[in-house]
Amino acid sequence: FDHNKVTVVFVLGGPGAGKGTQCARLVEDFNFCHLSAGDLLRAEQDRPDSQYGNLIRTAIREGTIVPMEVTVKLLSNAMSDALSKKTGTGWEDGRGRFLIDGFPRKMDQAEKFEEEVCQSSLIIYFDTDEETMLKRLLVRGQTSGREDDNVESIKKRFVTYRDTTMPVIEHYQKLDKVAKIDSTPGVEEVHAVASVAVKKLFV
Ligand code: UP5
Ligand code: MG
């Protein structure tokens, strides 16, 4: 997609940092199309004739990263679908606006997406401590039905985040594209700061 016609914001942060929650709030303010890589993978896993079901199920439970080809394809298909409508959510002033949540979590994904799909304009990085994230995920796990919301999977997700995703954030920090936001406070407080960071893109 043409970077001049599509605005892509990546939303990163550890498991339970609040990416999904904050994306939902930003959609209300800025009419973004919100695409969660994790949600797209879970939907693909549940599609009866998917050839990737088992691969995705295992990766999610083990907190590892699904091969990038799968995730990049799901994202670019979802972007094409949204853009083909040319109206409604994610379409503003003749341009597409995307919040891509939980992606890229590994350098190879970042490179492939920027080269083959679209360049990103901003990376929002929600930062908080593991104790806070663990607490949030265990509460959510009581009702989420997510197979990775248990202590064992959560610990594995933390390791992957530290070892594989932090280098992606550091890469973008060197390019001066990252808005780092403390996501320890309450939802509204975090949202207010995130909203200011995003607003700068659209002035
Ligand atoms: N909550 C949120 N904000 C709060 C606040 N400020 N104060 C108090 N409570 C707050 O929030 C989690 C919980 O905390 C909720 O109950 C919320 O109410 C509360 P949420 O907004 O859901 O956090 P989020 O950061 O979105 O957490 P999530 O668990 O979705 O993050 P993950 O990054 O772990 O999950 P994701 O779905 O992105 O990925 C899952 C798996 O998919 C990965 O582990 C991986 O195996 C696979 N994957 C890939 O392989 N490739 C990809 O590119 C992407 C995913
Ligand atoms: Mg999420």
Image (cartoon, rainbow, N blue to C red):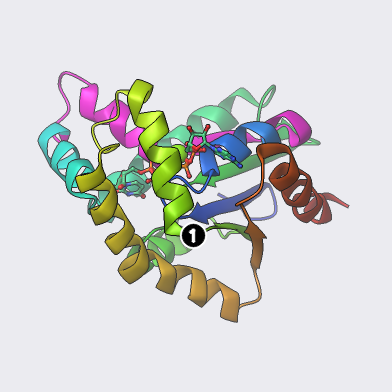
Amino acid carrying mark 1 in the image: Asp
Residue at 66% over, 48% down = 185
Residue that sits furthest to the bottom in the current view: 174
Does the stretch in magenta take in 37?
A: yes
Residue 135: which quarter of the image?
A: top left
Q: Where does the image place residue 40, in percent across and percent down from the top left? A: 37, 33
For this view, does 75 lie left or right of residue 47?
A: right
Residue closest to the eye, 134 or 126: 134
Neighbor class of circle 1 (other Cα within 10 Å; few <14, some 14-19, many 20+) is few
Q: Where does the image place residue 115, in percent across and percent down from the top left?
A: 45, 64
Region rendered in magenta: 27-52
Report the side of 141 relative to 94 (left or right): left
- As for residue 63 lying within the magenta part, the answer is no
Q: Would the CB of label 1 be found within 8 Å of ligand 1?
A: no
- Name the residue at 52% across, 37% down: 20
In this view, 202 is above or below 93: below
Answer with the quadrant where ligand 1 appears in the image: top left
Quadrant location of residue 96?
A: top right
Q: Name the residue rendered at 73%, 38% in the picture.
A: 188
Whether residue 57 appears in this view of the structure is yes
- List x then y, in percent, for residue 130: 42, 57
Disc 1 designates what residue?
129
x and y percentages locating residue 64 in the rendered image: 22, 54
Q: Nearer the viewer, residue 74 or 11?
A: 11
